[in-house]
Image (spheres, grey):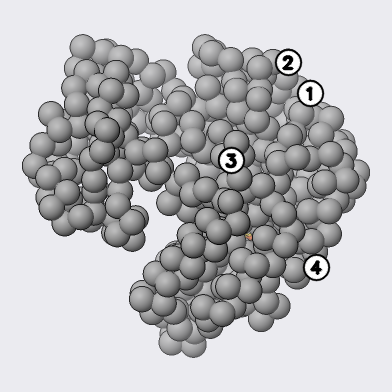
Amino acid sequence: MELYVHIPFCKKKCLYCDFASYENREAEMDGYVQALITEAEQQASFCVEAIETVYIGGGTPSLLPPALLESLFKALRSILPLEQVREFTVEANPGTLTESWLEAALRSGVNRLSLGMQASQPSLLNRLGRIHCFEDVAASVSLGRQAGLRNISLDLMFGIPGQRLSDWAECLEKALDLHPDHISAYGLIPEPGTLLADRINRGEWVLPDPEEERNMYELAINTLASRQFQQYEISNFSKPGYECAHNIGYWRQIPYLGLGVSAASMLNLQKRRRGLSYLRTANPSSLDDYLRMVRRRRWSQRDRQVILPEEARFETMMLGLRMNSGVSDAEFKLLHGLTPEEAFGSGLKVSLQKNLLEKKDSTWRLTRRGMDFQNQVLVELLPDEPWAGSSDAAIKDS
Ligand code: SF4
């Protein structure tokens, strides 16, 4: 199984950010780490298999003092089955990374670094509210390599207000010049309630039009392919052998335990007569509510949902189709006891006819066009009626 740990502290809130992240609350880091440890103790019984991948995300994990990071993982190792971890990623923000922090991260077991570069032009970084410049990214990559990290990923963003295709081309080239092993390229989504969405709604900033954004995505695919980066998921590209195992596990419905504010878990995977079921939980999305839940040991304040077989089948398609390897009849049948055609019938045919989906060698994949319109494919797979309400009782009966 997999472990995710959320560190919700940031130096400054980015304008587009709707993640659980807080500025000016560094004084609470000690208490937060203690809460993570308490939560791990409470959740440990769900870890019935060895944890193979760890991902520390945020927020800005590189803001945690090095000694605190080390003490967190020393404690987690004594609570959770972390002896067989093969990939251990930590997110860091350029401008916050130091040599001593990296040394502590490596001593904690980290072997993969994910850096939020986003853009290379100062004007666009400024527009996103990022605290760093491109030179900080280059310095962070260099620090990571000097520390001995052989797996470094860069996050990039396209579709930023004011961004031209030529800016994006330059950003890709500058990122490639740093010789990363993995690149994630996400289209910006202005999430409601963020400062960026407000500016767009007021007409102060204008997003690139959809055609321009599709051109940017196309450019990323072609540029990265020409530099031996294989696309293995809609937004993810890597050198051969450097795919992110943690994210692949998530798309393949490997169970995961999430610790921290807003962290989700997928646990208690069970294959029943009617197919796969599992429990999904989500921690409170506010830091105060999370700390209160842990302090008072009111674990019932988590959102809990039992995913029943019909919804689990949809999730297999929704997550699996994100990957270039797609969803094979055999793996779907192994999980659910029937083939995708038996589960979704006409829903798949519609997307085949629209050339959004293809089936080759008994495997379903999005076409290049389908990657742009994945939602249309998924809508065809949704049932007419909402899924039956899920409860703990329902899973016992299924
Ligand atoms: S660094 Fe990341 S988590 Fe923090 S505010 Fe910016 S986007 Fe959000």
Give the CA distance from mark 3 to mark 1.
Answer: 32 Å
Which residue lies at the image location 23% right of the left edge and 40% below the top edge?
A: 359
Give the residue pinned by disc 3.
Answer: 240
Would you say residue 218 is visible in this rendering? Answer: yes
Give the residue pinned by disc 1.
Answer: 74
Give the residue pinned by disc 2.
Answer: 78
Which residue lies at the image location 39% right of the left edge and 38% below the top edge?
A: 325
Which residue lies at the image location 28% right of the left edge and 23% below the top edge?
A: 330
Q: Nearer the viewer, mark 3 or mark 2?
A: 3
Name the kind of residue labelled 2 in the image.
Answer: Ser
* Pointers 1 and 2 in contact (C-beta within 8 Å): yes
Name the kind of residue labelled 4 in the image.
Answer: Glu
* Secondary structure category for the residue under label 2: helix
Q: Nearer the viewer, mark 3 or mark 1?
A: 3
Would you say residue 315 is visible in this rendering? Answer: no
Q: Earlier in the sequence, mark 3 or mark 2?
A: 2
Q: Earlier in the sequence, mark 4 or mark 3?
A: 4
Give the CA distance from mark 4 to mark 3.
Answer: 27 Å
Residues 194 and 219: in front is: 219
Give the CA distance from mark 3 to mark 2.
Answer: 34 Å
Q: Earlier in the sequence, mark 3 or mark 1?
A: 1
